[in-house]
Amino acid sequence: MNIEKQIEFDKVKAMWENLAVTERAKEQIRGASIYLSESEQRKQLRDTTHGRNLIEKLGTPPLQSLTELKEIMVTAEKGGCLTPFLLERVEAALAAVKRLKDYLGRGKFYENPLAYYEENLDPMETLREEIGRQIRGGIVDDYATKELAQLRGQIAKCEEQMKQKAEQIMRSNKACMADNFCTLRNGRVCVPVKKECKLKVAGSVIDKSSTGNTLFIEPSGVAKIYEQLQMLQIGEENEVYNILYTLSAMVASAAPIMNENMGTIEKLDFIFSKGKLSMDMDAVEPAVNTGRHMILRDARHPLMEQKISVPLQFEIGGDVRGIVITGPNTGGKTVAIKTVMLNCMMAQCGLHVTCREADLCMNSAYLCDIGDGQNIAENLSTFSAHITNVLKLLGEVDKDSFVIMDELGSGTDPAEGMGIAVAILEELKKSGALFLVTTHYPEVKEYASKTQGMVNARMTFDKDTLKPTYQMVIGEAGESCAFYIADRLGMSREMLRVAIEAAYGAEAVETYRFRNRGSVPKKRAAGRIVKSKKAKGKTDTGTKYQRGDSVMVYPDQKIGIVCEPANEKGVLRVQMPDRKIWINHKRVKLHVAAAELYPADYDFSIIFDTVENRKIRHDMNRKYTEQIIRCEE
């Protein structure tokens, strides 16, 4: 069954997706699942916290969708000619990169680790300014090049000459004119001549009126100027295409940097979407453990309004592996177990949780049985669907799983349902998993109180505000045959023995005729949790990196050289091929130590200092000088 839909995590994902801007981030959210690596989960939670902190300090980050830009880059890389509109979209995208770079730059003041992604953004000022200078208002600007300015000036001059020539002819032949103004017909300047005066005005007939009484003639003098205009227009068109192809080639050559920009923006969009969701839900970062215990303080369901949600206090772990919750209908049992599992799954997906505080363990799998699974097409009753789902669940559960089950053993005769509920609890206990179940059976409550590793829980109610409840009418229930249905659907003989004995006593087991010869359900291998190695003693802040060390810079996996060791905040300076950057020590990895690359007395100023500074320092060593060594920013 769809676990995410059963516990409503799909609705949380829908809210989360709406907060993302780029399609890549939305796709990543739709496919989000639990992390089984402890270090990765902790990183994702830290990213969410840093994203939220930056939004709270600086406001919503200036992100934009990149779908259109990706299509433009593909066209440019194939050698296509970008239209002025598409070039303006590239300019707008580069302006957005500049805004995001400035936004992250301001974040460095707050020492937020996400702010250092600013180093990975290049707004390409030269390309942006070039497009802005040559393209304006969706067309190539008149002054994009000197040639274009001259051609368009000559075109305007020719058009004015044509108009003046036509008006002169109209004044000279006023009696022949059908109107007192010239007009454009098929792109040509024409004068309106009366039909009977056709031969008095030299020129070519271009059009005529609907009645045929007026002819629109292009005078011969105007036609000569029009030929010049056509040649100028051809030159203008060629110059416009030359400009557009040049700019398109510039965009294509910038594709690697643009792709890097887009990758960084998509990565930040995913992180910031988690931060926005945390703010919208008023959530907090949970603590993470692998010790199989959970603590939730003032927990609430993420989809319920905070004002009407009653805070839940929950704790499990240690000697207690399972909790059985009892209480009447509408008491909130189902909401409670959904709240616990939903918060746990959100945390393991790198999201904050809707609690005052929480300490949650990692789980290899989330398994649940909630609701009415009746299927008319497969001829399965509610109980049959319930047992089918339970058997599948028991085949997947292991010691690192987390299981929730609602209305355990319901949908059948109370005595037999109670027995099956006890058998299921016994199997869950054997698996070593953490589990949380609800039930109406008092016998199950009694069983839990006497069984090691299990405890009872109850939902309290305010009798003054309690909504109407559904009541059970004794004596009107029909025969259910729960054991026979469970037997037919594949429940193992051992489980059935436990169920029958719990319901009717040991004598009943001997008289029961088993149909299924199955044994304990087959286990299916689940994912394994990878624990991160905990550092001993003082936390490393990058002191292991020395000047001259060759390091790998992540996530781009580029090689650089340490030019300044890490400060007390763990930030060190690295010489990249084209620039020097400040970066947190957690984002670099030692590639080759300096001791293996350089002699012990090697002068690193040869690599990191400028020629001017080295010359000044040399002069200082042998004589007095008033020159100043300027430090690089």
Image (cartoon, grey):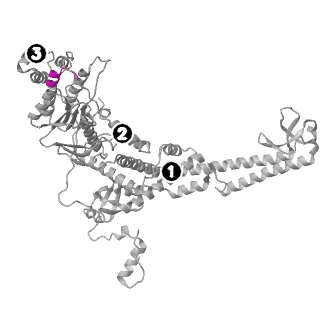
Name the residue furthest front. 464
Q: Position of residue 306 (x, y in %)?
A: 33, 44
* Circle 1: residue type: Ala
Instruction: Give the percent coordinates (x, y) of residue 27.
Output: 40, 40
Q: Amino acid at mark 2?
A: Lys
Q: Residue at x 30, y 18 (%)?
A: 378
Dots 1 and 3: beta carbons under 8 Å? no
Residue kind at label 3, given as amino acid type: Tyr
Which residue does the numbered mark 1 point to in the structure image?
93
Residue 393 is covered by the magenta coloring: no
Sequence-first tag of 2 and 1: 2
- For the N terminus, give its image quadrant: top left
Picture quarter containing residue 427? top left
Q: Residues within 10 Å of mark 3 (few under 14, many from 20)?
A: few
In the rendered image, which residue does mark 2 sit on? 13
- SS state under label 3: loop
Q: Is residue 176 left or right of residue 62?
A: right
Q: Which residues are magenta?
A: 411-419
- Read off the residue under disc 3: 512
The Cα–Cα distance between marks 2 and 3, rounded to whole angstroms, is 48 Å
Label located before the other in sequence (1 or 3) = 1
In the picture, measured across the screen, residue 112 lies left or right of residue 396, that is right
Distance in Å between CA atoms under marks 2 and 1:
28 Å
Comparing marks 1 and 3, which lies closer to the viewer?
Answer: 3
